[in-house]
């Protein structure tokens, strides 16, 4: 399949916030988490349907992969994959639907 992976501005902001938060305790772990999130985001281009359907949304186009304690949420579109959020696994997906609707 090999679709191009794009990041929404909100998802970039999510990842930056996560990195800043982790870096308060450890620059090393902040870099490790960011590196792994970026690695997983690149890997979904080849097999986008490998991620599970986000249960809160229930749309087969909206999928997620887990990286450590974080959820990488993405939308599979015909021409691309859009990363819409990176959030802690214990947080609710409150405004993710708004992000998805705004991207289509």
Image: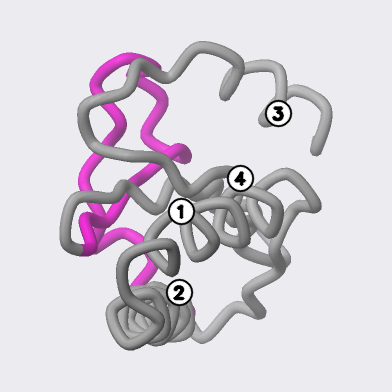
Q: Residues within 10 Å of mark 4 (few under 14, many from 20)?
A: many
Instruction: Give the mark nearest the N terminus, 3 or 1.
Output: 1
Q: Quadrant of residue 29?
A: bottom left
Give the mark toward the camera: 1 or 2. Answer: 1
- Against 25, residue 36 (above or below) is below
Check if mark 3's residue and mark 1's residue have beta carbons within 8 Å: no
Residue 84 location, quadrant: top right
Residue 46 in view (yes/no): no
At x 58%, y 51%, the residue is 17
- Identify the residue under disc 3: 99
Please give the residue where the numbered disc 1 appears in the rendered image: 21
Mark 3, residues whose alpha carbon is within 10 Å: few (<14), some, or many (≥20)? some
Report how far apart the C-alphas of labels 4 and 3 lie in the structure. 6 Å
What is the span of residues highlighted in magenta in the rendered image?
45-67
Indicate which label's residue lies in the foreground, 1 or 4: 1
Left or right side of 40 for 67: left
Q: Residue 54 appears at what percent x and percent y?
A: 30, 31
Q: In the image, is residue 44 above or below residue 71? A: below
């Amino acid at each position: 399949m090999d679709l191009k992976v794009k990041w929404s501005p909100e998802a970039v902001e999510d990842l930056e916030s996560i990195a800043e938060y982790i870096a308060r305790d450890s620059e090393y772990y902040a870099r490790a988490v960011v590196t792994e999130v970026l690695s997983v985001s690149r890997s979904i281009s080849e097999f986008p349907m490998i991620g599970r359907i986000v249960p809160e949304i229930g749309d087969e186009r909206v999928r997620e992969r887990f990286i450590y304690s974080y959820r990488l949420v993405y939308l599979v579109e015909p021409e691309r994959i859009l990363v819409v959020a990176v959030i802690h696994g214990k947080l609710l997906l409150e405004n993710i639907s708004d992000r998805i609707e705004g991207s289509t």
